[in-house]
Image (cartoon, rainbow, N blue to C red):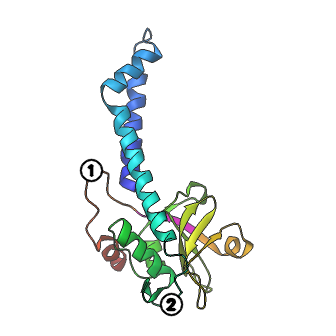
Amino acid sequence: MLAAMRISVFLSCLLLASVAHATPGDTQEDSTALIAGRGLLSQIEQVRNTVADTATDLVGNALSFLGVPYRRGGNSAESGFDCSGFVKAMYEQTVGLILPRKAEQQAAATQRIDQADLQPGDLVFFNTMRRAFSHVGIYIGEGKFVHAPKPGAEVRVESMSVSYWTRRFDGARRVATSGNDVPPAPLKTLAEAARRQ
């Protein structure tokens, strides 16, 4: 997702630069035609659609596991999930990336973002065990996230505005994925990066 976003920003900058270099006599229509003629608008739209499609697939896949029981150390629907096993499984199945196994390692291997910048598919971390980044979920939009909460519970959706989660919020992270024309990053890339830290 990050690489696609960088490409989108780069293409947007090219778009703005071409408009900024238009002669004073040029009209808005001339600038738009120039940009469209260079194919920049379609490239920007293609990147935007790829990022949205990946996030939609990830969130849809995660929501299909609602009701699967929590199991400490679990990382499959058959055995049950713990929080980080759930996130790891969703990214591997949907995006083709293997994240580290533990929540704190997942936080270390991903890019920090502001809570205001959360997008569906981003990771949200919480301090639920008197230790930073002890719980993780997948943001699904509209202030909600899906996660495997605790023993005796099942994968479910919750609101981040509930006081329990608000008080324990540790931060948001974005998982870097490859651009739209490049196959997903090799498996194990993020897990290996986290081990080196």
Which label sits on residue 12?
none
Residue farthest to the top, as pictured: 25
Q: Nearer the viewer, residue 180 or 100?
A: 180
Q: Which three-letter amino acid code belongs to the residue tagged 1?
A: Asp
Instruction: State which quadrant residue 35 falls in.
Output: top left
Q: Residue at x 50, y 85 (%)?
A: 82
Q: Residue at x 34, y 33 (%)?
A: 40
Numbered label tally: 2
Q: Earlier in the sequence, mark 1 or mark 2?
A: 2
In the picture, measured across the screen, residue 127 lies left or right of residue 178, that is right
Residue 173 in magenta stretch: yes
User: Is residue 79 depicted above or below 50 in this figure?
Assistant: below
Instruction: State which quadrant residue 163 falls in.
Output: bottom right
Circles 1 and 2: CB distance less than 8 Å?
no
Q: CA distance from mark 1 to mark 2?
A: 37 Å
Name the secondary structure under disc 2.
loop
Q: Which three-letter amino acid code belongs to the residue tagged 2?
A: Arg
In the picture, measured across the screen, residue 183 lies left or right of residue 194, that is left
Q: Nearer the viewer, mark 1 or mark 2?
A: 2
Q: Which residue is mark 1?
A: 181
Which label sits on residue 71?
2
Q: The N terminus is located in which quarter?
A: bottom left
User: Is residue 45 depicted above or below 71 in this figure?
Assistant: above
Residue 193 in magenta stretch: no
